[in-house]
Image (tube, rainbow, N blue to C red):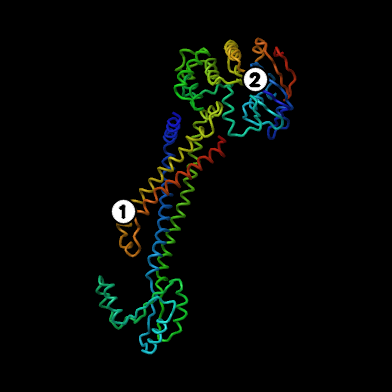
Amino acid sequence: MRAKYVLSEVFMGLWRNVTMTVAMIITMAVSLTMLGASVLMLMQVNNMKVFFYDKIQVSIFLKKDVSPDQRTAIESALKSDPLVKEYTHETKEQAYENFKTMFRDAPDLVNAVKPDTLPEAFRVSLHDPEEYQKAYDKYKTFDGINDIVDQRRLLGKIFGILGALQNMALVIAVVQGLAALLLVANTIQVAAYSKRREVAVMKLVGASNWFVQAPFVLEAAFAGLIGSIIAFIALVIAKRFLIDGSLSVLTELLTPVPWRNILLMLPLLAGVGTLVNSITGWITLRFYLRI
Amino acid sequence: MIRLEHVTKTYPKASRPSLDEVSVSIEKGDFVFFIGPSGSGKSTIIKLLLREIQPTRGKVNVNGREVGSMRSWKISGFRRSIGCVFQDFRLLPNRTAYENVAFALEVIGKSKAVARRVVPEVLELVGLGGKEHRYPHELSGGEQQRVAVARAFVNRPLILLADEPTGNLDPDTSIEIMRLLDRINRTGTTVVMVTHDSNIVNQMRRRVVEIDNGRIVRDQPRGVYG
C-alpha cells in the first residue's frame, strides 16, 4: 500500500510537470551518452596500447650509399644488444615487395615507386617498447644510418587524437551533466511546491521524513534511469551504425569495440544516472525546501 | 503531561523575546486556554510543543520527552502522539472529508483497511456522518474545522493542540466546535487551546493562562477572559 502510494505519487509528479520532465531526461541522456562514449574510448585506448605495443618496432633506415662494413657494424651491435628482443634485416627488394603488398589496392602508387627508391632497413623489436629513447641514443651515432623511426611515436599521435576526443566527450558530459542537475533541482522544487499542502499536512501528522521525501527523490531517480536507458540505446546505435557501419574502415586500423564493453555501459550509466539524480533531489529538498 | 521550565524564545533579529522565562505545567486530561493579545507569544507555545521551533533557553517536556533537544529524525514519531488544529483548517482541497482524514493515517503507514474502519467512526464522532464524500469547498467553515478536528483526533493522540480554532468561525459555530473539543477532552485527551475569543473562554470556565509580552501574567483554574 505504501509502495503503491509512493509510486503513484512519482508518476503523477513526473506527469504534472511533463515538459520539465522531458527536458530533464533529454539533457540527462545526452550527458550520460557522452560519459559512456568517454569511458568506452578510455577502454579502447588502453586496449589498443596493449595490442599495439606488443607489435611495434623501431625501424632503422639505412642510407642509400651505406657500405657493407657499416651494415655489419650495426647488425653485430643489434645482435649483442640486451635491449633488442629480435630484429630483421630488410633489403631494398624486400622493402619493395612489402610495399607492393601493402598498397596493392593502389597500383598507381606502386608503379610510381621503383625498387631502388625504398630504403634498406633493420626492423627491431625491443624487449620494452618504452626504452625506445635509449636505443635511439645508442644507434644514432652509427655511420650509415639515415633515420630511426619509432612506431610508437606514430601510434602516439593516434592515441593523442583519441585522447582529445575522449576529453571532449568528457567535457560535454560534465557541462550537460551540470545542466541536467540544475533541471533536476528545479523539477524537484516545482514538484515540492505543487505539493506543499500535502507536505505540510504530512509533517504535521508525523509522517516520517523518508516517506515525505521518497516520492520526490524517486521522481529524480526515475528520470535518471530513463535518461541512462536512452543513453545506452544511443551507444548501441552508435556501435551498430557508426563503428560497425560507416566507420568500419577506421576500426580495422584501430582495435574493434566489443559488444561486451557496450553492454557494460548499461549498469554503469544507470547507476551513475539514478544515484546522481537521487542525491541532487535529496539535497534540493533539504536545502531549498527544508522538508 | 506538558511542562515548560523557564522557557525563553527569542526569534532571530527580534528585539525582545517572544517568550520570557515561561514556566507552566499541564496535567493529563487538562483543558487549558492560553489567552493574550496578538503578538503576546501564545502561538509560540504551540510551535514549541510541536517542535516546529526550539527554545532559546529552558526545557520543553511533552509526554515525558524532552522536545527542545529532540533529534530531528525523532520528531515525526513524536508528532504522532499529538493532534493539531489551526485557524485556517489546513485541509487538502482536492480530497474529500473522508480522504483528508484517511490521508493522515496513510502517511504514517496505516493500511487502507484500518482507514476504512476508523475514519467513518471519527467523522461520525465530529458530527459529519453522511458528509464523508464532500470536498472542503462543499462544506461550511464549521464543517471544515470538524474535518480538521477529526484528522487531528483519528490517531487518538494524548494531546490536542488548537491554535485559534474558532478564529474564522461565527459565534454559534464556534460554540459547536468548542463542544466538540470538550467531548474530546472528556475522553482523556489533554487539550491546549490558544485563543483571543473572550466569549468562549468565559463560557467554558476552564483553566486560563494569560500571556502578555512573553510573560505569564495570570494562571487561573476556572478563569474568565477578563
Marks 2/1 in contact by CB < 8 Å: the verdict is: no
Helix, strand or loop at label 1? It is: helix
Bin the neighbour count of mark 2 within 10 Å (Cα to Cα): few under 14, some 14-19, many 20 and up: many
Task: Give the secondary structure at mark 2.
Answer: strand
The one nearer the camera, A191 or A286, is: A286
Q: Position of residue B69 (x, y in %)?
A: 66, 33
- The quadrant where residue B179 appears: top right
Q: Quadrant of the C terminus of chain B?
A: top right
Please name the amino acid that badge 2 sits on: Val
Residue at the spot 54% in from the left edge and 16% down from the top edge: B146
Amino acid carrying label 1: it is Arg
Q: Residues within 10 Å of mark 1 (few under 14, many from 20)?
A: few
Residue ID at (48%, 41%):
A278
Against B102, residue A172 (above or below) is below
Q: Quadrant of residue A61?
A: bottom left
Q: In the rendered view, does A204 fall on the left or right side of B9?
A: left
Whether residue B79 is situated above or below residue A71 in the rendered picture: above
Task: Report, in whole angstroms, how far the alpha carbon at label 2 lies from the one at label 1.
Answer: 71 Å
Q: Which residue is mark 1?
A: A240
Which residue in the structure is indicated by mark 2?
B194
Q: Which mark is residue A251?
A: none
Residue A277 lies, in percent from the top left, at 47, 43
Q: Chain of mark 2?
A: B
With A12 as the anchor, is A245 left or right in this view? left
